Image (cartoon, grey):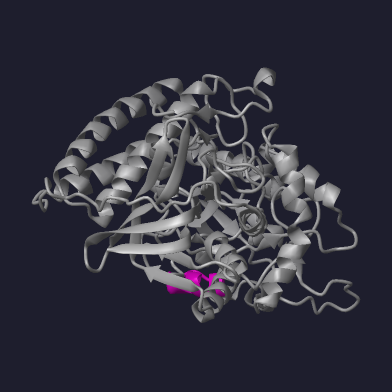
Amino acid sequence: MLHQHDVLIIGSGAAGLSLALRLAQQRKIAVLSKVELNEGSTMYAQGGISAVLDEDDSLEAHVEDTLIAGAGLCDKDAVEHTVNGGPAAIEWLKSINVEFTIDDEPGSSNELHLTREGGHSHRRVAHAADATGKAIETSLVASARKHSNIELFEHHMAIDLIARGTHNDRYIAGAYVLDRHSKKVDVFQAKFVILATGGASKVYLYTSNPDGSTGDGIAMAWRAGCTIANMEFMQFHPTCLYHPQAKSFLISEALRGEGAQLKLADGERFMKRFDERLELAPRDIVARAIDHEMKRLGTDNVYLDISHKPEAFIQDHFPNINERCEQYGFDLSKGPIPVVPAAHYTCGGVNTDLRGRTDITNLYAVGEVTCTGLHGANRLASNSLLECLVFAKAAVEDIESREQVHNNEDEIPPWDESRVTDSDEQVVVTHNWDELRRFMWDYVGIVRTTKRLERAQHRVDLLNREIYEFYSNFKVTGDLIELRNLVQVAELIIKSALSRHESRGLHYTRDYPDENPYMEGVPTIMTPPNR
């Protein structure tokens, strides 16, 4: 089946839907979601969105905090571009009825309640209690469903981008897409294509992300010929609830922003041995400190304690987290809860400029799928939703100002499955999926060595061959598409990590424990073989 639109947006989180809403006044839009619309990472973002809204704060301070967290690898132009767009992004969200928490403290000069998170020098995180992503995504979905120019395709998974033209003049004309209900592959043709597919944290055994974070956009862009940057910088959130049924439920950094303390089983606070900022140090430092203590003591977790705060304060500020913890037998007001680090955010991704343009004509990328230069070697807390909104707006302005370079009206061949059959060996996909995520956790996790990375490289090479053979012979399924993409992303992470002979930000290797001054400001650029 052929679908034709002006713009195809792959992904339905904050990046994809905000772009669709801004662009839909003049364009016919298709938005793809491989599950339900609201099941992306945005829905599960707890903390908030950072923006300079307090008179005691400044844009310069937010820029400086971001640069410090990025450990010498941020692009300052990208940082300033994003930070400057913060206040307007908050106003736009309010215009679509996102209900932020109001500051009702006597004498406060702020309309919104602002919290502080790790790495920030001021309170500048606007939030909707402890479920900011849910508030944003719910409003975006409601607005998109009402718009006549936006066509929403749930349970549709992109397989590959459709690249046309010559080697030196390549452009994207759409995508092949699996309809997960009919199990047929359709052609989606469009004048412009936007990747808003999120990150790749599902490549690790333990992650705070939903199941869909499988690096689809990064892998598709790589196969189409885009350059990819900084994939070695995978952020591990320091505090996810440790419980066999919790599936790495995220415990927001906002708890530490409001005074929660990290402790060992005997009640000792340990962050003082690692950083003078204690629990409010950047995430890479806190995650490595927890990892160090767990390995030193041979324990499965550490503890997070905010029970010294009044019960009413906890219930008012963290109602959803407290309710979820109670489901697993923990009460934030009564004592510490067990926590462990988990893969959380992909700081690298598809190379784009400040307008969201990739290095292939007609293809844009926005949000966690990208490497814009904002995050550098480590993302500052609550800058991710901000990046989605600011770069979506920039991409919209660029698309509206452009005359299309190619008309994209060439006839695109339908998906060819004449030489494949239904698989009777699905166990191969399941086994490879589990093997990949486990060795990535063991060998390419918070602390790395060259030997561990080489072991991972050897295993990913074997998996690549197995999956290529499987993909070539059998009909595609959702699990196979995601596994194919995860293996590609894993290879990019490993190769990027092997090429960085230093420790910087989220990339820490025992073989090169110090920063290399010659690598400051130098991103890791991976160029696909078809370029």
In the rendered image, which quarter is residue 392 located in? bottom right
Foreground residue, 301 or 284? 284
Q: Quadrant of the C terminus?
A: top left
Residue 517 vs residue 290: left or right?
Answer: right
Residue 119 in the image: x percent, y percent? 72, 47
Residue at the (40%, 49%) spot, across then down: 216
Mark yes or no: residue 206 visible.
Answer: no
Q: Is residue 275 above or below residue 206?
A: above
Residue appearing at x 53%, y 61% in the figure: 16
Magenta-drawn stretch contains 325: yes
Magenta stretch encompasses residue 79: no
Give coordinates of residue 335: x percent, y percent. Answer: 57, 65
Which percent across, then down, holds residue 44? 51, 65
**Would residue 137 be seen by someone viewing this image from the given angle?**
yes
Task: Give the residues drawn in magenta, as a range.
Answer: 320-331
Vertically, is 126 above or below 346? below
Above or below, 306 against 516 in this view is below
**Residue at the image position 88 percent from the left and 79 percent from the top:** 106
State which quadrant residue 370 falls in: top right
Q: Is residue 188 left or right of residue 388?
A: left
Magenta-drawn stretch, dominant element (helix, strand or loop): helix
Task: Give whichever of 283, 74 is nearer the camera.
Answer: 74
Residue nearer the viewer, 6 or 375? 6
Residue beneath the point at 80% across and 43% down: 64
Which quadrant holds the N terminus? Answer: bottom left
Residue 473: x percent and y percent? 14, 43
